[in-house]
Each structure stands twice: as C-alpha cells, then as structure tokens.
Image (cartoon, grey):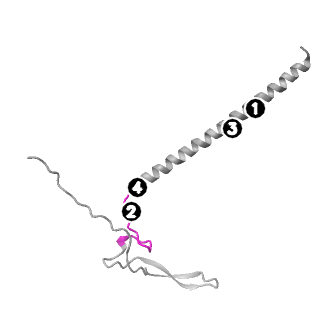
Amino acid sequence: MDAWVWWVIAVFGLGAVKSVNDTVRTALRTRHKRQMERLQAAQAERREIAAAGRAPEPVCGCTHHLAKHDKQGKCHEAVEVPTAWDADRKPTQYEAGTCNCQQYVGPQPLTRVYAEEIADV
C-alpha cells in the first residue's frame, strides 16, 4: 500500500477516536448530572420526612416563642425599640423595650397524657 493510504487511515482513525471520546465524555457528564439530581432529591426527601415528624413550633407573629407570652397572650420579651432616625428614615439608635404583640395566635401545643399499661391479672 502506498503511504497516502496510511495517512488516510490514520486521519479517519483519529476522527473515530475523537468521536468516541466525545460520546463517552458526554455520556459521563450526563450520568454525573443525573446522579447529582438523584442525590439532591434524596436529600430533600430526608429533610421533608424529618420536618414532617416534628411538632409545629409555637411561635407568635412577633417571632417570639409561646413561653414568652402570658395566659392572656401578652408578650413579655425584651426587644430593641428605635428612638432616633437618620435622613433616610433608617433607625440609628435603639432602646430596650417590651414587645408590642397583642396576643399569641400560633399553634397550641398538645398536652402530653400518660396512661398506665392495661395488664390482665
């Protein structure tokens, strides 16, 4: 065979190798992307299951816990109250004050009940 035939075979061979390489690289990239999506979905599912098992936090609209409210619903948490503002109406000074929340309206925690085991005697 002539030398030019070997050159043609070499060029087509390199083209075929490059094509196979590109195909493999694309397949691996797609596989990695799908695997990462599966891992993120599994992680989100674990977070949702953990969140579903927890009781709702008794937090008021003022963002304070039910423990900071008295029986009438008045909040007794200390907060920072702005006392001075700049030209853009942004607070520059604060003082300690009480929360102005009127009443707790969040979820009421369920009471815990203890019952003895019933045994046949």
Magenta stretch holds residue 90: no
- Of mark 3 and mark 1, the one earlier in the sequence is 1
**Badge 4 element:** helix
Which label sits in the foreground, 2 or 1? 1
Please give left or right for residue 91 compared with residue 5 in the image. Answer: left
Residue 87, quarter of the rendered image: bottom right
| CB atoms of marks 2 and 1 within 8 Å | no
Residue 102, quarter of the rendered image: bottom left
Q: Quadrant of the N terminus?
A: top right
Going by the numbered disc 1, the residue's amino acid type is Ser
Residue furthest out toward the left: 121
Q: Which residue is mark 2?
A: 56
- Of mark 2 and mark 3, the one earlier in the sequence is 3
Going by the numbered disc 4, the residue's amino acid type is Ala
| CB atoms of marks 4 and 1 within 8 Å | no
Query: In percent of the image, x 23 and y 60: which residue is there?
Result: 113
Crowding near the residue tagged with mark 1, few <14, some 14–19, many ≥20 C-alpha atoms within 10 Å: few
**Badge 3 element:** helix
Magenta-tinted stretch: 51-67
Per the model, the C-alpha gap separating discs 2 and 1 is 56 Å
Q: Position of residue 70 (x, y in %)?
A: 32, 77
